[in-house]
């Protein structure tokens, strides 16, 4: 039995190295960082944010997003045009080049959770499946937060300042 010990140790190390930070996900060349969403009532729409990074050697293309917690999930992009914020669906998927990343963040790309089936409260989790063009499916969870989980100097979120006292 003694010869199995090194194998187990290596397996444990390999497992540890794939988990960068709590709440982050990595499958193959795809890394999802800081997935989060805001509190919202059942029946309302929710908004999901995360960073999608390509740490592999081939382009990845996010084709669709599914969630058992919503009627449907859309890929949206917010744009400021003439002082008015509007959003539109992203059609044809979203491609991330090797070494690149796309930030889903307030004021830009976001996941629109249409018709929430249950109320999202702070501290809760919202399950989500990212579906890639090559058929790969990646299950993640958005953590329900009152504001962006990481302080960022150049936040475009008008609500961000209201949560600074946390
Ligand atoms: Cu939207």
Image (tube, rainbow, N blue to C red):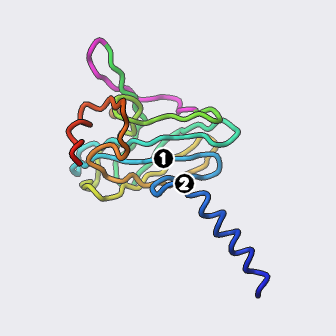
Examine the rendered structure and indicate whether residue 29 appears above or below residue 124: above
Pointer 1 residue Cβ closer than 8 Å to ligand 1: no
Residue 51, percent from left and from top: 47, 41
Residue 65, percent from left and from top: 46, 44
Q: Is residue 134 left or right of residue 107?
A: right
The N terminus sits in image quarter: bottom right
**Residue bearing mark 1:** 33
Q: Nearer the viewer, mark 1 or mark 2?
A: 2
Mark 2: few, some, or many residues within 10 Å (few <14, many ≥20)?
few
Quadrant location of ligand 1?
top left
Nearer to us in this view, 147 or 118:
147
First reached walking from the N terminus: tag 1 or tag 2? 2
Mark 1: few, some, or many residues within 10 Å (few <14, many ≥20)?
some
Residue drawn at the location 63% of the way across and 35% of the way down:
99
Residue drawn at the location 56% of the way across and 47% of the way down:
31
Decide: marks 1, 2 in contact (CB < 8 A)?
yes
Residue drawn at the location 43% of the way across and 47% of the way down:
34
SS at circle 2: loop
Highlighted magenta segment, given as a residue range: 82-95
The furthest residue to the top: 82
Residue 132, percent from left and from top: 57, 43
Residue 20 circle label? 2
**Quadrant of residue 87 in the image?**
top left
**Quadrant of residue 90 in the image?**
top left
* Gap between marks 1 and 2 measured at Cα: 9 Å
Residue 105 circle label? none
Residue 137, percent from left and from top: 56, 51
């Amino acid at each position: 039995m003694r010869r199995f010990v090194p194998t187990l140790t290596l397996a444990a190390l390999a497992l540890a190295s794939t988990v960068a930070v709590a709440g982050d996900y990595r499958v193959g060349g795809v890394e999802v960082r800081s997935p989060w969403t805001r509190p919202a009532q059942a029946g309302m729409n929710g908004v999901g944010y995360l960073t999608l990074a390509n740490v592999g050697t081939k382009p990845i293309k996010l084709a669709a997003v599914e969630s058992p917690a919503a009627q449907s999930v859309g890929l949206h992009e917010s744009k400021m045009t003439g002082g008015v914020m509007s959003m539109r669906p992203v059609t044809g998927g979203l491609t991330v080049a090797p070494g690149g990343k796309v930030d889903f963040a307030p004021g830009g790309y976001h996941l629109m959770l249409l018709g929430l089936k249950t109320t999202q409260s702070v501290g809760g989790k919202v399950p989500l499946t990212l579906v890639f063009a090559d058929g790969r499916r990646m299950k993640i969870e958005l953590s329900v937060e009152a504001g962006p989980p990481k302080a960022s100097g150049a936040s475009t979120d008008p609500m961000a300042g209201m949560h600074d006292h946390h």
